[in-house]
Amino acid sequence: MSLLSTKQIQWPCELSEITKAEIMDLAIEIDGIDRYSTLIDGDQQRGIYYCVQGLGTFATTSIDNRPLASFIFGKQMWVGAVAIEIYPKINLYTCELEPLKSLFFPKSELNELAKRNNEVYKLLYSIMRTNSPKIVQGMHLSFYGIEERIAFFLLELVRSKKSTNLPRIEIKITQQQLSEIANVSRPRVNEVLNKLAQEGLIELVRGKLYINDYAALAQSLEDRVVM
């Protein structure tokens, strides 16, 4: 059970106060990224997560263990509903970009609650409806060039930090981490970031970068990519 109240949670849909309380009774508080690596593990490890604070990413991996379509998540985001039933056991790549604190809701207990409270299905559907387009977009971008993929993941990092309204946005990420998230070699990541910096869209600092013009970066991607 979490010490957070139902009013401190960003719920993805309208739920009764009774349902919210029953769901929160199942919550297990966790720190870090390690638990997310079991998101598509054995059935007993599955469930949904609510990110209380921090920033992270996970991705399915190729045969040679390279990250494929990455999913970025941050504060007030729910994840896990897409994979709670339909996916086989798959290894996941995970990366903690900012210290994570999360709530975990075990699948087995959610299933038991759903037997007597249909609103649980409403919660799961709402999470899937929000997250599925993000997953598909990440996969879709693999058909485009490296510059488009890097720009997309930079924008996703900003959106996951809930920072789109800030004039200048700090993202603590190394080029190696961005290379892994976007499945692009580090030299090519460096090449794209330097180009974006020359255009004034970002500023590079050791171990992090700044988005100087979120709207312009988003528009440049929109002009080149059909989403």
Image (spheres, helix red, strand yellow):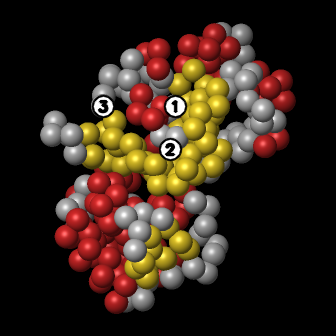
Q: Disc 1 designates what residue?
A: 81
Amino acid type, mark 2: Asn
Q: Is residue 147 left or right of residue 174?
A: left
At a point 56% along the width and 13% down the height, the residue shown is: 108
Tell me if label 3 and label 1 are in contact, CB under 8 Å.
no
Q: Quadrant of residue 193?
A: bottom left
Does residue 125 appear anywhere in the picture? no
Work out whether residue 176 or residue 13 is closer to the camera in this orientation and state it: 176
Q: Is residue 164 left or right of residue 143?
A: right
- Disc 3 from disc 1: Cα separation: 17 Å
Work out whether residue 40 or residue 4 is closer to the camera in this orientation and state it: 4
Amino acid type, mark 3: Asn
In the structure shown, which secondary structural element does the residue marked by tag 3 occupy?
A: loop
Give x and y (percent) for residue 9: 74, 41
Q: Which mark is residue 91?
A: 3
In the structure shown, which secondary structural element does the residue marked by tag 2 occupy?
A: helix
Comes first in the chain, label 2 or label 1: 1
Quarter of the figure with the N terminus: top right
- Disc 2 from disc 1: Cα separation: 9 Å
Q: Is residue 204 above or below residue 58?
A: below
